[in-house]
Image (cartoon, rainbow, N blue to C red):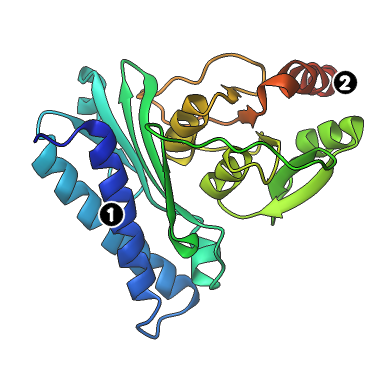
Amino acid sequence: MTESDEQLAERLATAAGAILLALRTQGLEGKALGQAGDDAANAMLCRELGAARPGDAVLSEEEKDSAARLAHDRVWIVDPLDGTREYGEGRDDWAVHVALSIGGVASVGAVALPALGITLTSHDPLLRAPANRPIRMLVSRTRPAAEALFVAEKLGAELLAMGSAGAKAMAVVRGEADIYLHTGGQYEWDNCAPAAVAQAAGLHVSRADGTPLTYNNANPYLPDLLICRAELATEVLRIAAEFSAD
């Protein structure tokens, strides 16, 4: 049986995670471990995508970009190790992203959370309802955005600091948090796979101003992102606009 795009994304994200976990046992630490992880996971992903989908283009954080991808409708967008700092520190809030953009839309995605032993996919995202608790809003461990802090204060939301973009987005899918608003700058590989999984789970996914996310752009910089429970989206976007207007 031919492997579907969804199956391929899940297999490769999970396999890259296994490589990264194995590297952690080889005595490296910190930046050296992070660099080794980036290199090893990227090499495998690019090799396997080239073999399985030779007619598709690939955009990876760890590869030199080529304008040739702009002529392709199908582009795999990957982050071999999202949250390199967290990975090197021995934390569990890091991820592997494997996504397929078709016509500029995040159509297929797999986000592996290797330290937790799970891979979430756009084929079977398994959205979980949150527990009976206050609204939780995710922010960066190291540089929480002023806009996100403003929105959290207006909503009376609890702040939950976490590492990688993939880990934060999947925390919303898994019901551990309710809102992930990022305005501090990202690239397409940071959010394409998380966006595909979150959309499939029925979450609201957009730019911070409510406009759609688009992929395979000439400049892969994609500075902001909102992933949240659908019933919160209107209010979050209203408050974010209030912040921008000040």
The residue lying at 56 percent from left, 58 percent from top is: 93
Up the image or down, 218 lies above or below 135; here it is: above
Up the image or down, 204 lies above or below 114; here it is: above
Residue 231 location, x and y as percent?
72, 20
From the viewer's side, name the closer residue of 65 and 200.
200
Quadrant of the drawing holding the N terminus: top left
What amino acid is labelled 2 in the image? Asp
The residue lying at 38 percent from left, 81 percent from top is: 25
Quadrant of the drawing holding the C terminus: top right
What amino acid is labelled 1 in the image? Asn
Is 200 on the left-hand or right-hand side of 233? left
Q: Is residue 63 visible?
A: no
From the viewer's side, name the closer residue of 83 and 7.
7
From the viewer's side, name the closer residue of 79 and 19.
19
User: How far apart in space, not on screen, are marks 1 and 2 (Cα)?
Assistant: 42 Å
Residue 158: which quarter of the image? top right
Where disc 1 sits, the SS reads helix
Q: Is residue 184 visible?
A: yes
Residue that badge 2 annotates: 246
Where disc 2 sits, the SS reads loop
Residue 61 location, x and y as percent?
37, 46
Is 128 on the left-hand or right-hand side of 237? left
If you read the primary sequence from the N terminus, does the residue marked by circle 1 or circle 2 appear first?
1
Q: Nearer the viewer, mark 1 or mark 2?
A: 1
Residue 71 location, x and y as percent?
20, 18
Residue that badge 1 annotates: 42
For label 2, count other residues whose C-alpha is less than 10 Å away and answer few (under 14), some (14-19) or many (20+).
few
For label 1, count other residues whose C-alpha is less than 10 Å away and answer few (under 14), some (14-19) or many (20+).
many
Give me the disc on residue 31: none
